[in-house]
Amino acid sequence: MALSPDIMKTYGRIDIAFTHGKGSFLFSEDGNKYLDYATGIAVNAFGHSHPDLINALQDQASKLWHVSNLYKIPEQDKVANLLVKYSCANQAFFCNSGAEATEGAVKVARRYAWSKKDTERDEILCVTGAFHGRTLAMLAANDRPLFREGFGPKVPGFSHAEWGNIEDLKKKLNNKVAAVLIEPVQGEGGARKAPINYLKEVEALTKENGSLLISDEVQIGMGRSGKLFAYQNENIEPDIIALAKGLGGGFPVGAVLAKSEVGDAMVPGTHGSTFGGNPLAMRAAEVVINLIIEDGFLETLNEKIKYLDTKINSLIKNQTNNLENHNEILFVKAKGYGFLRGIELSEKFSVADFSTEARKKGLLLVGAAENTIRILPPLNTSFEEIDLAFLKLKELAQELYKKND
Ligand SMILES: *Cc1c(COP(=O)(O)O)cnc(C)c1O
């Protein structure tokens, strides 16, 4: 099956096409079944074909798809109300993707400073290893020159402090900084969890400096951290939150949440999105939020997270058992938290090769920076499916050792 020459070559695509999905499994054209722990890069929060999502979308599809934000959209009111009720924010703006959410967050932060006549304060302080999307401005917020190469001048107004280094951040905070933009756990950056207390200290420093704190929860938000929002694990209150990926459970939708004082800087005409928050997207998001906040759901999810932890730790610990000639370990260390987990692999094994081999065993995973393989299960995966994933990983490890010995 050749890749189509009619499609721009922006992706190094894997030569598999899926025909349908059910729960945590995907089925391909050539008749294979895969345990999907890649979830479309943390998008299919409730796996595939969830009956509530199908019902909501079918119902809405037969009524109304799009009207534009020229009119009231009651479906938006419902979702905004849920997001506000369960977060520290008071307002929501809806868009269609992660990059739009982070860009929107940056616009809100700058506009807030501007509205307070603090017009010099327009810089966004980011951290090394960050990934905030692919628009021109977000390329400057990211920390990978490779992504930026060949795309003209770097958009000004973005600087970087070293990830996890509070002293460096302190040094780089000044009265020009409108906001610190940060992921509570870096997804693309290699499933890197912030060091303990780091975000709390970042929050304190931003407050002291009169800057805002933007939590980019595009990947870790919407339950993936074990709480609805990741910041809730850190005992902090960001001023702005960017959401997307899991929010629509597979339907494209993003959101910028803000405290009212900050969000009020945005008045009619200052920002917009033609498609943003259309009724179909809102029905999907409403279902996803309701599933997460349902009684007992997060408790069970946290048990599964603990179970996943023990599985990862024992995979790493037991990898050398029953091996005689191994000269190098495969799994270096566990990374991330919640259901945004990673395992860093030894340099001898590339993540690309590892995910190819995992796929051959019917397990879908995603690579990340730092030679890290990401494990992104659907939030409603079962304990049995976690067992299955780790059985496959264990077998795979044994095969790879044999090859390399
Ligand atoms: C994926 C991602 C983005 C960009 O999302 P898109 O929908 O691809 O634009 C931004 N921030 C984080 C943390 C992400 O993981």
Image (tube, rainbow, N blue to C red):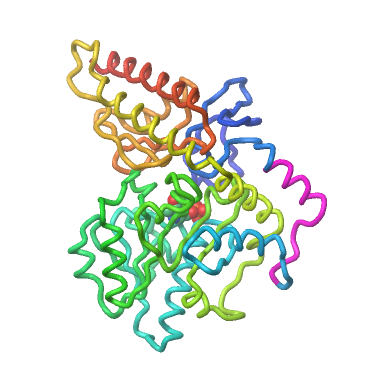
What residue do we see at 37% from left, 28% from top?
353
Q: Pick whichever, 189 or 3, lies toward us.
A: 189
Q: Quadrant of residue 201?
A: bottom left
Residue 68 in percent (x, y) is at 71, 67
Determine if the magenta segment contains residue 310.
Answer: no
User: 74 left or right of 91?
Assistant: right
Q: Is 339 drawn above or below residue 393 in the view shown?
A: below
Which residue is at the far bottom?
117
306 vs 46, left or right, is left
In which quadrant will I find the N terminus?
A: top right
* Residue placed most toward the observer, 392 or 146: 392
Q: Is residue 228 visible?
A: yes
List x then y, in percent, for residue 289: 58, 50
Query: Does residue 178 appear to the left or right of 209 in the view shown?
Result: right
Residue 149 in view, yes or no: no
For this rendering, which residue is in front, 27 or 239?
A: 239
Q: Position of residue 295 (x, y in %)?
A: 56, 43
Q: Is residue 24 above or below residue 136?
A: above
Specify the farthest residue to the right: 62
Boundaries of the magenta span: 53-69
Q: How many marks?
A: 0
Residue drawn at (37%, 78%) of the image: 122
Q: Quadrant of the C terminus?
A: top left
Q: Residue at left 48%, top 60%? A: 242
**Is residue 85 positioned above or below 284 on the image?**
below
Image spot of residue 181 (x, y percent): 37, 64
